[in-house]
Image: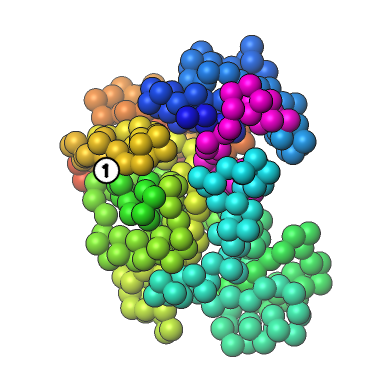
């Protein structure tokens, strides 16, 4: 099996996807924008061959890299990046090289559109916030009058929390309409709730090989806008109500042979038309693994290896490794360079050394969302997790 993996060197843990594929006997062919001599030993060992391009943004360069691999190794069986930023390009490459094991451009466009997701959620029976495209000013004003303020504006095909705008009143809405946006936007009614996510590797029949739930006590948009301290955690179990909705969403979206990362609101108060306090509301579907170090957190929470489970799905269609061991809450807490904290990194490691499972420096490209220095801990209760996060974030 010939597998092309886009950007195996960034984020810096993504060589693991390639490593597990290669363990399974696949020929793994990496394409990235880091010169070969600057790659870590882990990345070099994880691929059979690496093709350097000056820019992954330049489709012609990436196309030529895939063409070279196709000429040298034969037909490409699978192409992936696991990175939201490259999903559209991945789909285009699949179309151009007739790679049928993943989504093409037409399907990916629907999956990535926050507007085109709505009817798919409805078909799954999952409630979602009311929405309007920011096109006709009169239509947008009528929508605002119907739903009331605040409202939430976001790119129709955005990545993470980038470009999101809270619209608190009519004046802010008129400013948005007057200045316009450089890319298509949607406007949604504001939902008061906690954000949680569902992760799974989906097999060829649309069934999960494993399931995970992540809780985000601090909203990511607020985290970026207000430069808040970051903490969130993966859970040892998945709420059956969330799993039922997520599985129905997978089927409705037609997702197969992919990692999925779905975002939901859990209402913290009754919301007419959406549900009661504690109900789940669909936010968005991401047809790739969760970003950053989240795959590692899932591993620590469930004592298995999601990189291996995904690689097994790619190479064998299923996985004998999707069996949990001992389970934990894996809690991520990070410090920002712009603040002075009461406890240094060394003091955190000394105090919590027996439960710290991973720590390090966040790449600058991800630091707005995730902070700068991170510490992950495996704990048996969320109460312990709250005390741990408070210790990491205590200010000097």
The relative height of residue 165 versus residue 67 in the rendered view (above or below) is below
Confirm whether residue 199 shows in the render. no
Verify whether residue 62 appears in magenta. no
x%, y% of residue 204? 39, 50
Instruction: Name the quarter where the C terminus is drawn.
Output: top left
Question: What is the secondary structure assignment of the residue under circle 1?
Answer: strand
85 in magenta: yes
Residue at 71%, 35% (x, y): give it.
Answer: 63
The x, y position of residue 351, in whole percent, is 29, 26
The residue carrying mark 1 is 329
Residue toward you, 33 or 218: 33
Residue sitting nearer the eye, 217 or 293? 293
Q: Quadrant of residue 303?
A: top left
Residue 40 in sight: yes
Q: Is residue 99 left or right of residue 298?
A: right
* 209 left or right, relative to 51: left
To which quarter of the image does residue 166 belong?
bottom right
Q: Residue at x 33, y 78 (%)?
A: 276
Q: Is residue 327 left or right of residue 192?
A: left
At a point 69% along the width and 30% down the height, the residue shown is: 67
Which region is colored magenta?
64-90
């Amino acid at each position: 099996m010939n597998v092309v993996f886009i950007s195996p060197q960034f984020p810096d843990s993504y060589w693991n996807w390639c490593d597990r594929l290669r363990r399974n006997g696949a020929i793994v062919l990496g394409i990235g924008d880091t010169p070969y001599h600057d790659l870590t030993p882990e990345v070099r060992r994880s691929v059979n061959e690496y093709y350097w391009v000056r820019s992954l943004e330049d489709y012609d360069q990436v196309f030529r890299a895939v063409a070279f691999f196709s000429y040298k190794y034969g037909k490409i069986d699978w192409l992936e990046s696991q990175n939201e930023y490259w999903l559209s390009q991945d789909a285009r490459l699949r179309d151009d090289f007739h790679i049928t094991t993943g989504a093409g451009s037409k399907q990916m466009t629907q999956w990535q559109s926050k507007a085109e997701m709505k009817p798919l959620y409805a078909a799954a029976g999952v409630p979602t916030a009311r929405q309007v495209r920011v096109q006709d000013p009169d239509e947008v004003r009528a929508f605002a009058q119907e739903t009331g303020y605040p409202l939430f504006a976001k790119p129709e095909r955005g990545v993470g929390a980038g470009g999101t705008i809270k619209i608190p009143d009519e004046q802010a809405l008129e400013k948005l309409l007057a200045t316009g946006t450089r890319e298509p936007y949607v406007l949604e009614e504001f939902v008061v709730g906690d954000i949680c996510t569902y992760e799974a590797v989906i097999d060829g029949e649309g069934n999960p090989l494993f399931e995970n739930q992540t809780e985000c006590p601090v909203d990511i948009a607020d985290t970026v806008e207000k430069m808040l301290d970051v903490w969130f955690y993966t859970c040892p179990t998945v709420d059956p109500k969330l799993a039922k909705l997520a599985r129905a969403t997978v089927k409705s979206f037609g997702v197969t042979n992919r990692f999925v990362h779905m975002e939901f609101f859990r209402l913290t108060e009754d919301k007419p038309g959406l549900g009661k306090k504690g109900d789940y509301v669909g936010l968005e579907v991401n047809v790739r693994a969760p970003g950053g170090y989240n795959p590692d957190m899932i591993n620590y929470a469930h004592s298995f290896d999601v990189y291996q489970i995904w690689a097994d799905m790619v190479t064998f269609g299923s996985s004998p490794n999707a069996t949990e061991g001992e389970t934990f809450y894996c809690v991520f807490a990070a410090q920002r360079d712009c603040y002075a904290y009461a406890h240094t990194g060394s003091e955190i490691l000394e105090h919590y050394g027996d439960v710290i499972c991973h720590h390090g420096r966040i790449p600058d490209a991800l630091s707005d969302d995730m902070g700068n220095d991170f510490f992950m801990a495996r704990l048996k209760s969320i109460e312990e997790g709250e005390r741990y996060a408070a210790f990491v974030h205590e200010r000097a």
